[in-house]
Image (cartoon, helix red, strand yellow):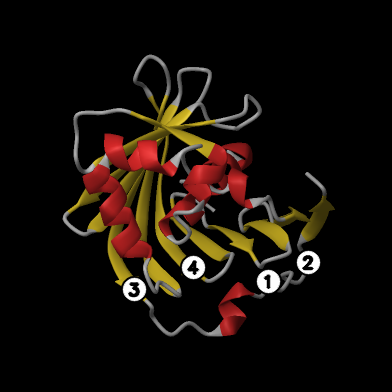
Amino acid sequence: MKKLIQTTCLAFVLIFTAQSSDAQEIQPDARALLERFAADLYSLSGEFTQLTVDGSNEVVEESTGTLLFEAPDRIRWDYLEPFPQVLLADGEQLWHYDELLEQVTVRPQPAPENSPLLVLTRPELLERFYRIVPTDLANVIEFEPLTDDSEFERARLIFDGEWPIALDLYDRFGQSTRLSLDNLERNPVLDPVLFQFEIPEGADVLEGL
């Protein structure tokens, strides 16, 4: 489960095409929505539901929680149900705390190209690391990594009006994950301490995993 959570969040902690002019020609509406959402975005808060299914459409994992973002690269995910966990990227390191196991893992924070959620706040990453896949849906941006070593094969960012409401991730083994976003708030004032991880007393610490 820990690997599933980290992979999904890194994929969420969207990025896009090699040629921005082609991307805009293919999906001008969705790209314009993304640009407007990201403009002057310094912080973000909200709630999420994460649902993962396998190739047989059987539910592998379902969880809910809250998310926080602060520019340029600080992200916090608090998993509330069914198992309390924290995933925190502080700009230098990525911390994962499993409350039930009383275990902390820490490793260097992944590069932006491995953090698809950053596309919501930095759309220029699309041009550097992904290619757009044409769709007939004006509110959807579908994209795939330019390299073969990504942790996901393709993704879809979905808008409802001016707001992103879901990110779908598909891996190379037939598994898919939908991250649904709710109650998003643009530019809330966030206490810096929220992005500073303190190791809980008594917790085991594992590095580099």
Residue on which disc 2 sits: 202
Residue at 36% in and 22% down: 58
* Earlier residue among tags 1 and 3: 3
Mark closer to the observer (2, 4):
4
Q: Earlier in the sequence, mark 4 or mark 1?
A: 4
Q: Amino acid at mark 3?
A: Arg
Disc sitting over residue 57 in the figure = none
Residue sitting at x 34%, y 20%? 57
Distance from disc 4 to disc 1, alpha carbons, whole Å, reads 15 Å
Question: If the image is split into quadrants, where does the C terminus sit?
Answer: top right
User: In this image, 42 relative to 111: left or right?
Assistant: left
Q: Which badge, 3 or 4, comes first in the chain's sequence? A: 4
Q: Quadrant of residue 20?
A: top left
Query: From this viewpoint, is residue 149 visible?
Result: yes
Tags 2 and 3 in contact by the CB under 8 Å rule? no
- Residue drawn at (61%, 54%), measured in percent from left and top? 100
Report the residue marked by disc 3: 186
Residue 113 drawn at (x, y percent): 60, 45
Q: Nearer the viewer, residue 150 or 26?
A: 26
Q: Earlier in the sequence, mark 2 or mark 4?
A: 4
Closer-to-camera residue (23/81)? 23
Marks 1 & 2, CB-CB < 8 Å contact: no
Quadrant assignment, res 103: bottom right
Q: Is residue 105 left or right of residue 120?
A: right
